Each structure stands twice: as C-alpha cells, then as structure tokens.
C-alpha cells in the first residue's frame, strides 16, 4: 500500500446508479482514472463520455485498480461483485475495497474479514446526503478503517463528501453509525405520523399543527422535510416506505447482534411494515401515517 | 362579554411561579390591573412591587376580574383554585377563565364544562417556550376557544407570546396540541438515547456521532439541545426525567381517551419510567440513556 492515493491511481467503480454515477464522475473531474461497471450499459456509457473508462464487468472495472469503490444496493450485491464475479481477484494484490452501500454492521464485518484474508484492505464507508450530495460532492461519509488505510483512501472520500468522519478503526463501525442515523430518521418520521394522526382524530388542523411543531422544541429535520408531504399531497416519492422497512430492519438486526434492546425503533419498524402490508410500500415514506389511520381510525 | 379586553380590564392571575410571575409582570407593563395570588408570599410581593395588586387568595385575585389566568401546575390545582377555593364564583358573571397549565385534554374538557355551566367562558391555552419565553413575552400559545372568546382575550395572550395559534374552537384541542408537542419532544429524547446507547456499545465515539447526527437528516431540536448533555456531563438540570414521566403519561392518557394506539410514545414512556425507577427521576431528562445502559449493558 502506497501513501495516499493520487491522480495516477486507477479506481474501479461498481454501481453507477443515481448516486454512484455522479460520484464516479467527480473522481474523473479530480483526475483519477476511473473504470466503471454497471448492469445498465447507458450509465457506463455516460461515465465514459465524461472521461472515465467503460468496463464490461465488475472484474474488468477492478483490473489494475488500487481502490475498488462499491456503490451497490446492499451487502449481498457487494458479496456477489467481490467473490462470485471475480472483482476482488482482479484488483491489485495490495488494493483497498471501499464499501459505501448501506449494510448491516455484521454483514460488513464478515465481508471485511474475507477481503482482508486475501491481503487487501477494507474500508467501511456508508454515506448520507442523497443524490444532491452525491452530485455536489457534499455527502456525509461515516468511515471506519485502520488509520493508515483511512489516510490512504482519504483523497477518494474527500472527492465524494465534505463531511468525512473517521468513526473507528474496526469494519462495521461506519455501518453502525449509518444504522444509528437511520434509526433516528425512521423513528422521527413514524413519531410524527403517530402525533399527527392523534391530533387529526381530535379535530386539529394539521397545517396549523405542522407550523407549531416545526418551530418548537418538538421540531426535527424530518418534520420540516416530510411534514408538508404528510399533511398535504406527498407529490413525487423522494424515499419510499419500503426503504425504512429495510433500513429499520437493519437497525433491529444490528441491535440483535449487539444484544441491545431497541423498543422505540422496533415500534416504528412495525408501523412501516404495516403500511407496506396495506400495499403502500412504494409510496412516499411520509405515508406511514396511513398505518396509524387504519389502526385507530381517523 | 365586551369586545377585546382593554387596559381597563381587571385580570386575576393565580400561580406566580418561575413562568407565571414574569407573565403577570408583562401584563402590568402593558397597563392591565393585575391581581396576583400564589402560595409563596414572596412572589406576590414581587408582583406588587412591580405595580400589580397583592391578593390574599385565589378568590381575592378573582374579585371583579374579567379574565382569570391560571398558570398552575396541573388540572387538579386548577380545579381546586376554581371550585374549592372559590375563585370562579368571585370573578365577574361573564368573565373568562384562561387555563395555561399543561393538562390532559380530557381533564381540560371537563373543567371547561363546569366553568361554562356558570355562564362564563373558558379558554384552553397551554404554552411552550419555558422561562425564557415567559420573561420575553415570546411564548408559543396553543389556544382553543370559540372565535368570539378567542378575540376577547387575544390582547392578554399577545402579552404572553408572539406565536399565538388558534388551533380550534373546542376546549381540549389546545391541550391536545400541547400533548402532541410533548409526544414529539419525549420521543426525540428517548430515541436519541436508544441510538446513542447502541453506538456506545459498538465502540463508537459519541461526540463524533453527535456531530454527525446533528448535521444530517437524523437531526432534531432535541438532539442539538440535549445531545451535548447526554454525551458529556449534563450540568444543571433544565428539565427532569420525571417531567417526561408525567408528560408522556398525559400523552398516553390522551391516546386512551381518543382510543388511538401510540406504540412509539408508549415505548418512550417506559424508558423514562425505568430511569425514574433507578432513582434518577430528578436528573436531567437526557439521562434517560441510563435506562438503556442498564437494560442492555454498556
């Protein structure tokens, strides 16, 4: 492993979705050689048009790569890319894998072990900040890795985000911080639904209520962002109910493996599940209020 | 009932505590004749020194009063003052009672009925904003009353707060909005404790975590305010664990009378209760994290 990666380094990038593609493009802009792979040929072409290299497979993207960035959907996809599709074997013998998907901490730990067993390094680095943050290079990155490894890949992480936190040296700790972040996000949305459905039943005008709780000690980022979507028409889906079925599922899985009781997160998860069970899993996550309306009447 | 109350109106004020006293003084400054009563003679003297009238009892405070403001601790105290101690009978026959304590919506409804049965008006007007808001006249006031009654007392409410919301015409609706506000506040604190205790068990540095979640979609007013108190030394108590044992108790009571299931608030209440059960009820409410540490180990 060299010192920090530089503009001469080859970076493999797998997963050119709505977040991965702009992240990979930002690496190109910064002067890195980026070999990108995705199932969607269109996304690969867009990266090549922007100055990247179109790879034909994850293993092809990893050829000669010092760093391999995985911006895939979940831990299962990361496992498939690395092991079944041969990306890990294709990259440099002392290369570093950066896993940026939202995964359960336990799954990250076990992937890290398998990567490190081949003599390569592993960086656990989930993100938050959405498509806007991915495009602007302003993501929050919750990174865990040994100090030397963190310093090695820091120029890459700095390209993706302006809030890069080194939260620990063990793989899984980055995922744990992201997990905790999602616990709070999910609970805040469900708690708002619980509060608003109670007020609605009591005949309170929800628009007035939203104005009050947006400006009091009861406020949250989610109240300001999701509140209008819950009270009026939700508009286009920014994040679906089923995302929190999954993410609060990861939270509870983390609690189980840490043997930590999470009664509030568990209650919130049930309400997202119930909403999904009503056939509303693809609706905007603010629509978790539907579960409360169904449970207790409007 | 005249039109809006004016500087010639006599206002009775019962409950000159840390919030009531500055509120009553603000009425004096505005030119109202304020007759104040409290069990603490010192507080009554302070009001008189500021230009108010020292009353010897709640009934004395209510003499000739067009408006009677109750800034007492709870619904039981309001009932005692109005009915057992004769304040209601002492005030003008067409007077208006303004109840500003935090009470369960059901209790407010039943007090309103008894007041209205005597031909007088009732205004349900709980507040938020604490001592700072009471002193500065910047409280948030969540008021329910018939339109004409609301307009009648509006000059009094405007003296207390700069965010006066008329949330409904029925007594109990103001209390319901305050209840919903407290549901969110209590859940946000307990959810933060749940999240932080999980992260702590996973070896995450809580100060770094706080920095991350204070600036992400996971943020809340409570995370910014109570977070530092949870992660470092809590310092002097701003609001105690037992306040949320009480306030989330009121939330669940409201849910019961509305027949609305509140699974998240119920879980949060249990954790404040457990903290109080550890003998920590008088500690800062951020210390609800102690219950999590005890339940699942640190």
Image (cartoon, coloured by chain):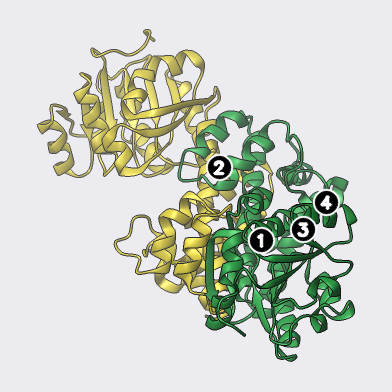
Chain colours: A yellow, B green
Q: Are marks 4 and 3 in contact (CB under 8 Å)?
A: yes
Give the label on residue B245, or none. Answer: 3
Mark 3 or 1: in front is 1
Mark 2 or 4: in front is 4
| Circle 1 Cα neighbour tier, 10 Å, few/some/many (<14 / 14–19 / ≥20) | many
- In space, the residues marked 3 and 1 are separated at their CA atoms by 32 Å
**Above or below — where is A4 with respect to B183?**
above
| Circle 2 Cα neighbour tier, 10 Å, few/some/many (<14 / 14–19 / ≥20) | many
Q: Are marks 4 and 1 on the same chain?
A: yes
Q: Which residue is mark 2?
A: A180
Mark 3 or 2: in front is 3
What element does badge 1 sit on?
Answer: helix
What element does badge 3 sit on?
Answer: helix
Mark 2 or 1: in front is 1
Chain letter belonging to callout 3: B
The quadrant in which the N terminus of chain A is found is top left
Relative to A54, is B138 on the left or the right? right
Mark 4 or 1: in front is 1
Total numbered badges shown on the rendered structure: 4
Q: Are marks 3 and 1 on the same chain?
A: yes
Relative to B208, is A27 on the left or the right? left
- In space, the residues marked 4 and 3 are separated at their CA atoms by 8 Å
Q: Which residue is mark 4?
A: B276
Relative to A241, is B268 on the left or the right? right
* x then y, percent, for residue A56: 18, 34
Question: Toward the viewer: A277 or B270?
Answer: B270
What element does badge 2 sit on?
Answer: helix
- In space, the residues marked 2 and 4 are separated at their CA atoms by 25 Å
Q: Which residue is mark 1?
A: B27
Q: Quadrant of residue B94?
A: bottom right
Question: Toward the viewer: A266 or B227?
Answer: B227
């Amino acid at each position: 492993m060299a010192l920090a990666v530089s503009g001469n380094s080859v970076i493999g990038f797998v997963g050119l979705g709505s977040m991965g593609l702009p992240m990979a493009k930002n690496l190109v802009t910064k002067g890195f050689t980026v070999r990108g792979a995705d199932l969607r040929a269109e996304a690969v072409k867009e990266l090549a048009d922007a100055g990247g290299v179109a790879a034909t497979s994850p293993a092809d993207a990893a050829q000669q790569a010092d760093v391999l960035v995985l911006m895939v959907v979940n831990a299962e996809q990361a496992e498939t890319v690395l092991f079944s599709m041969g990306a890990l074997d294709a990259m440099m013998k002392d290369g570093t894998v950066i896993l940026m998907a939202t995964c359960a901490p336990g799954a990250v730990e076990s992937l890290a072990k398998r990567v490190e067993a081949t003599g390569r390094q592993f960086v656990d680095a989930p993100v938050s900040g959405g498509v806007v943050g991915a495009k602007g290079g302003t993501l929050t990155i919750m990174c865990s890795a040994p100090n030397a490894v963190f310093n090695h890949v820091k120029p890459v992480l700095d390209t993706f985000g302006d809030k890069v936190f080194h939260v620990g040296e063990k793989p899984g700790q980055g995922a744990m911080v992201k997990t905790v972040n999602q616990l709070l996000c999910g609970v805040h949305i469900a708690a708002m639904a619980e509060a608003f459905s109670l007020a609605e039943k009591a005949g309170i005008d929800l628009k007035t209520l939203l104005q009050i709780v947006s400006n009091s000690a009861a406020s949250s980022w989610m109240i300001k962002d999701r509140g209008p979507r819950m009270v009026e028409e939700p508009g286009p889906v920014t994040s679906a109910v089923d995302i929190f079925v999954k993410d609060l599922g990861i939270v509870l899985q983390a609690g189980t493996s840490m043997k930590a009781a999470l009664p509030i997160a568990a209650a919130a998860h049930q309400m997202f599940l119930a909403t999904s069970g009503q056939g509303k899993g693809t609706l905007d996550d603010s629509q978790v209020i539907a579960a409360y309306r169904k449970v207790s009447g409007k």
